[in-house]
Structures are given as structure tokens and as C-alpha cells.
Image: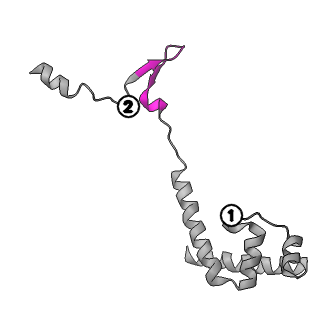
Amino acid sequence: MFFRSGKKSAQDISINEPIETDKSGNTLTLMDTMAVDDTIIDNLDIKMKSEKLYGLLDSVLTRRERSIIWLRYGLGGGKPLPQRVVAKKLGISRSYVSRIEKKALQKLRGQFDEEE
């Protein structure tokens, strides 16, 4: 009976069980070899905030403000563009792009803070 009960648990391994020793003689456990990703919560938080921000872009900003933010920050996988390039694309001055961008960011920040 003893051998039968031992046979059932023969394949069980503890993550704290030593599996090897290093050159210094220190034991290496299975837990030591497992990769632990401590940033899962941070990545999830960033993803949730990003989704919220994309929703606010459509609901809070005007079409012009939205296009300037998309171009300036490379949203949607695009390359971030300098103000002078955005200004040329939209046919407006660089200083006007700057003012619109600043106003749009203030709107987004205010709405984002209200909803948290």
C-alpha cells in the first residue's frame, strides 16, 4: 500500500524543490528559473487608459483638433510629426497648430481627470 500511494504522487513536483546547484553550491529551484512579469498590472492600466483616451478623442475634440493630435503624436500607428509639417499639411501656420494642440490637450486632460 505504501508503494501504491507513493506512485500516485511520484510525478508531483514542488516549485521550491531543488533541481540543480550552481558553481558555488547554492541550490537552484524551479521557482528561480520561472520568469515573473511584474508589469502585467501596469500594462493593463496603460491599455485601459489608452482606450479611454481614444474614446475621448472622438467625443470631446473637434475634427481639426482631433486631426492635429493624431498627426502630432502619431496615433493609430503613425509617425509623430513636427508642428511645421502638420501646419503645411493643414494649410495653417505653425503657431496656430500650437494653439489648437494646447487647447485640445487641455480639453482631453480635463475630461480624462473628470472621468477617473
Compared to 76, does 91 lie above or below? below
Looking at the image, which residue is at 14% across and 25% down?
5
Which residue is the extreme one toward the left? Answer: 1
Residue, disc 2: 15
Q: How is the image coloured?
A: one colour
Residue type at numbered disc 2? Ile
Q: Nearer the viewer, residue 58 or 104?
A: 58
- The segment highlighted magenta reads 19-33
Looking at the image, which residue is at 48% across and 30% down?
33
Q: Is residue 61 left or right of residue 88?
A: left
Q: Is residue 41 left or right of residue 104?
A: left
Q: Is residue 79 left or right of residue 8?
A: right
Q: Residues within 10 Å of mark 2 (few under 14, many from 20)?
A: few
Residue 69 locus on image (x, y percent): 74, 74
Q: Nearer the viewer, residue 113 or 39?
A: 39
Q: Earlier in the sequence, mark 1 or mark 2?
A: 2
Residue 52 highlighted magenta (yes or no): no
Residue 26 highlighted magenta (yes or no): yes
Dividing the picture into quarters, in which one does residue 97 lie? Answer: bottom right
Gap between marks 1 and 2 measured at Cα: 41 Å
Dividing the picture into quarters, in which one does residue 76 lie? Answer: bottom right
Quadrant (top left, top right, bottom left, bottom right) of the C terminus: bottom right
Residue 89 locus on image (x, y percent): 85, 76
Q: Nearer the viewer, residue 14 or 67?
A: 67
Quadrant (top left, top right, bottom left, bottom right) of the N terminus: top left
Q: Give the foreground label among 1 and 2.
A: 1
Local SS, label 1: helix
Q: Is residue 113 in view?
A: no
Residue type at numbered disc 1? Gly
Dividing the picture into quarters, in which one does residue 75 lie? Answer: bottom right
Local SS, label 2: loop
Residue, disc 1: 77
